[in-house]
Image (tube, rainbow, N blue to C red):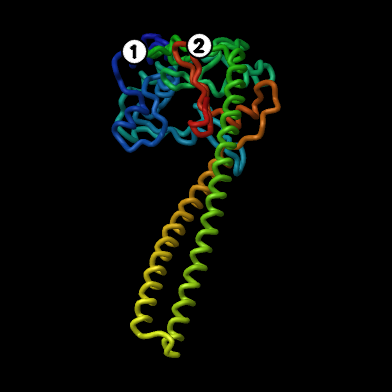
Amino acid sequence: MAADKRLKTPEIARMLNADGILSPSAYKAKTRNYKGRVQPFWSGNSVYHILINRIYTGSFEMYKGHKVAVGSKFVKKVPTNQRTVIHNTHEAIVTEALFEEAQKMVRLNPSKRRKTMSNRPPEPMLARYLKCGCCGCKLFQTHQGDPHYDCHSARWRVDGDCDRVLCDAEALEPVVFHSIKTLVQLANQETQRNRTASQKAEAREAKLKNAVRSLKEKRKAINGKKVSLYEELKRGQLSLEGFKDAKEKCNAEEEMLKNQMEEQIAELARIRAEIDALNEAAEASSFPPITEDHLTPELLKTFVQKVIIHPDGNPEIVFKVKDEFCP
C-alpha cells in the first residue's frame, strides 16, 4: 500500500492518475446513475477521505456527526474514539491492522491548521470566481496574503496544463471591471435598438388597424347596398335579372374585401408578436448605468458567474446574462 510506504496523499493521487484508475466520482458516473459533480482525476483530498474511511475494513461507523442545534444546518463532527463501530457488516477490502497503520501515517502528517478568520488576511474580490481553464477546479492562493492564484490540481495530475495556470487576482480586477462596463454599454445599446424597432412596429400596427377599420366600413356599405337592391326589386324598380347581376357583383367585391381583411388581421397578429418579443428583449437587456469607478462585490454578484484562467494566461469572463451581450 502507498500509505504504508510513507507517501503523502498528493503523491498517491499522482500514482493513481498515472495508472489510469478512475476517481471515485468518475467510477460512480460510469457504473451507476450518478447525478453529482464528477472530478475526472484523483486529488489529495479524495485519497485522504479513503484512508480515514473505516468502511473498507468491513466495519461501519455510526454517528459521525450531529447538528449543533435543532433546525440548524451546521454539523459538528464526533471524535473518532467516541463513534459507534459495527464490525463485520460486509466483506472487507483491507485488514483492520493495515487500516490502523494507515491512520498512524495520517497522524504523523497532520494538515496545517488554517488561520482563524480574524487573523486571515482578506482575499481579493475575485478569489471565489477564479476557475482553472484546464480542469475547471477552483484556483487557490499560492501563499497566504499573495494575490497570485494557481491550480492545485497540478500537484497530482500527470496530464494537462494545470501547472501553467496562474493569475494575479488584484491585477485582474480592472480588466473585469472594464468588461462589465462594456457589457452594460452593449446591452443598453441593444435595449435602445429593440425599443426603436418596437416603436416602428407599433406605427405599422396602427396603420394596419386603420386599414382594417376602412375595410370593415366598405363591407358594411356593401351590405347596405344589397338591402337597397332588394327593396328596389320589391318595388319593381329593378328586374330580377338586374338584381341577380348586381348582387353577384356585390358578393364578389365583399369576398375580395374579406380576403384582404383576413390577410391584414394575420399581419396584425404577427406584428403584435414582434412587438411583444422586442419589448421583452429590451427589458431583459436593460441595466442601470454603472456609477462606480472600480470593481465592487455587488457588480461581481450581479454580472459575473466565473472567471476562467487559461494556461496561456488569458482570462475568460463568463457572465450571467445572454451571450449575445457579452464583449
Foreground label between 2 and 1? 2
Taking the image as shown, residue 119 lies to the left or right of residue 205, namely right
Q: Is residue 222 left or right of residue 187?
A: left
**Viewer-nearest residue: 313 or 184:** 184
Q: Nearer the viewer, residue 83 or 214?
A: 214
- Judging by the rendered image, the residue that carries numbered circle 1 is 15
Residue kind at label 1, given as amino acid type: Met
Point out which mark residue 166 bears: 2
Disc 2 is placed on an element classified as strand
In what quadrant of the picture does the N terminus appear?
top left
Q: Residue at x 69, y 20 (%)?
A: 118
Of 217 and 127, which appears nearest the observer?
217
Residue type of the residue flagged with mark 2? Leu
* Residue 268 location (% of width, % of height): 48, 55
**Quick check: 150 left or right of 244?**
right
Q: How many marks?
A: 2
**Which mark, residue 175?**
none
* 148 in relation to 36, above or below: above
